């Protein structure tokens, strides 16, 4: 990671200038409870990790740098500016990654100034911050929001004190997953490999299911379904049925390996889909988080209700 000054542009025109040349923890103390008070507990769950734990999680590779935001602590072996961090979970089950911006806007509006956004292995950071526990589907079950959550991190240059003693790193699997293979059985592409000698997730098949779905399983929506219906409805169904991955998309349509969101009022800024400037929900496969033992949805995720504008007041509409 290079130390430099970076300007972050938020949706709506707001910008912030982060001086990464000043990264690194100092001895001046700041209270965890004070920092936690900036965030509404109805939509945020706040924990922290030490700078040693930041190094630990940064050395655990992530599969894809999808939303690099802020100081990048991923997929390298040498890092400068290590410091303790707030780890934040935000209640949401939408394709909505504006939580990065919203967390930074909250910090911008706070009296505290010696901070910077951090991009790292959020799953491992959330575990060490005591925000949740690992489930058999490879996801983190957040103790406050369940699976309906996104994570981010804020680097704090002062030394955080007054950390709740109840926060601990749960190294075990979630107890509801013991002797349960519901997520594996219900996964439409068999991506969860619980019965292998070493448990693993076929992320390729999982990602293709989310993006492109299966032509023989129309009950579970995909991003392609929403995109073709709302952005490019002129594409013939027989062509869509041939598209199961990015290579197929490149072969059968003139867009390369990505679905463009550039018609009928739709845009995509890398964090959320918008229709005429308003954030909208895009439903996709949620089978592995919707089983009766682990979800408030009681085994059937309400895909038909996940539509329309995104609501930030705890997403009560969905």
Image (cartoon, helix red, strand yellow):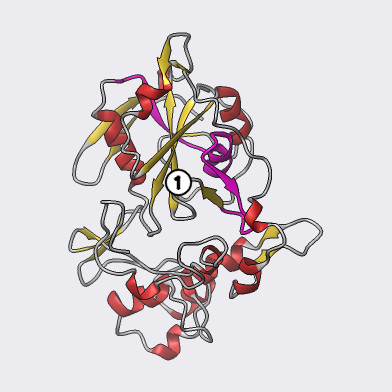
Q: Is residue 257 above or below residue 32?
A: below
Q: Is residue 199 left or right of residue 233?
A: right
Q: Residue at x 51, y 71 (%)?
A: 299
Q: Position of residue 4 (x, y in %)?
A: 40, 25
| Nearest to the observer: residue 31 or residue 232 | 31
Quarter in which the C terminus is drawn: bottom left
Does the image show residue 19? no
Q: Point out the stretch of residues depicted in magenta.
A: 112-139
| Nearest to the observer: residue 318 or residue 272 | 318
Q: Is residue 120 magenta?
A: yes
Q: Residue at x 57, y 53 (%)?
A: 139
Residue matched to label 1: 144
| Nearest to the observer: residue 298 or residue 77 | 298
Q: Position of residue 222 (x, y in %)?
A: 44, 73
Does the image show residue 128? yes
| Nearest to the observer: residue 275 or residue 310 | 310
Q: Is residue 270 left or right of residue 168?
A: left
Q: Position of residue 25 (x, y in %)?
A: 48, 16
Q: Position of residue 200 (x, y in %)?
A: 70, 58
Q: Is residue 125 above or below residue 263?
A: above
Q: Is residue 311 above or below residue 52?
A: below
For numbered disc 1, what is the local secondary structure?
Answer: loop
Q: Is residue 254 magenta?
A: no
């Amino acid at each position: 990671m290079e130390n430099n000054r970076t300007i972050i542009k938020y949706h709506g025109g707001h910008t912030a200038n982060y001086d990464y040349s000043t990264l690194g923890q100092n001895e001046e103390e700041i209270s965890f409870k004070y920092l936690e008070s900036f965030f509404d507990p109805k939509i945020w769950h706040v924990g922290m990790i030490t700078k040693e734990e930041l190094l630990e999680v940064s050395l655990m590779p992530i599969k894809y740098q999808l939303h690099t935001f802020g100081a990048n602590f991923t997929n390298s072996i040498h890092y400068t500016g290590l410091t303790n961090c707030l780890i934040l979970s935000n209640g949401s089950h939408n394709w909505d990654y504006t939580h990065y911006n919203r967390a930074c806007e909250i910090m911008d509006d706070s009296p505290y100034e010696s901070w910077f956004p951090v991009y790292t292995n959020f799953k491992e950071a959330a575990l060490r911050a005591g925000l949740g526990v690992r489930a058999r589907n490879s996801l983190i079950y957040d103790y406050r929001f369940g699976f309906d959550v996104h994570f981010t991190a804020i680097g704090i240059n002062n030394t955080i004190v007054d950390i709740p003693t109840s926060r601990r790193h749960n190294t075990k699997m979630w107890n509801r997953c013991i002797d349960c293979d519901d997520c594996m059985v219900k996964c439409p592409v068999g991506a969860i490999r619980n019965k292998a000698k070493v448990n693993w997730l076929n992320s390729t098949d999982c990602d293709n299911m989310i993006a492109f779905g299966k032509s023989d399983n129309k009950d579970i929506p995909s991003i392609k379904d929403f995109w073709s219906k709302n952005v490019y409805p002129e594409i013939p169904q027989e062509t869509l049925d041939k598209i199961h991955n990015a290579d197929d998309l490149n072969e059968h349509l003139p867009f390369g390996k990505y679905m463009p969101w550039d018609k009928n009022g739709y845009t995509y800024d890398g964090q959320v889909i918008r229709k005429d400037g308003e954030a909208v929900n895009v439903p996709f496969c949620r089978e592995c988080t919707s089983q009766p033992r682990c979800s408030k949805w009681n085994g059937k995720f309400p895909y038909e209700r996940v539509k329309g504008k995104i609501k930030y007041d705890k997403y009560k509409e969905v």
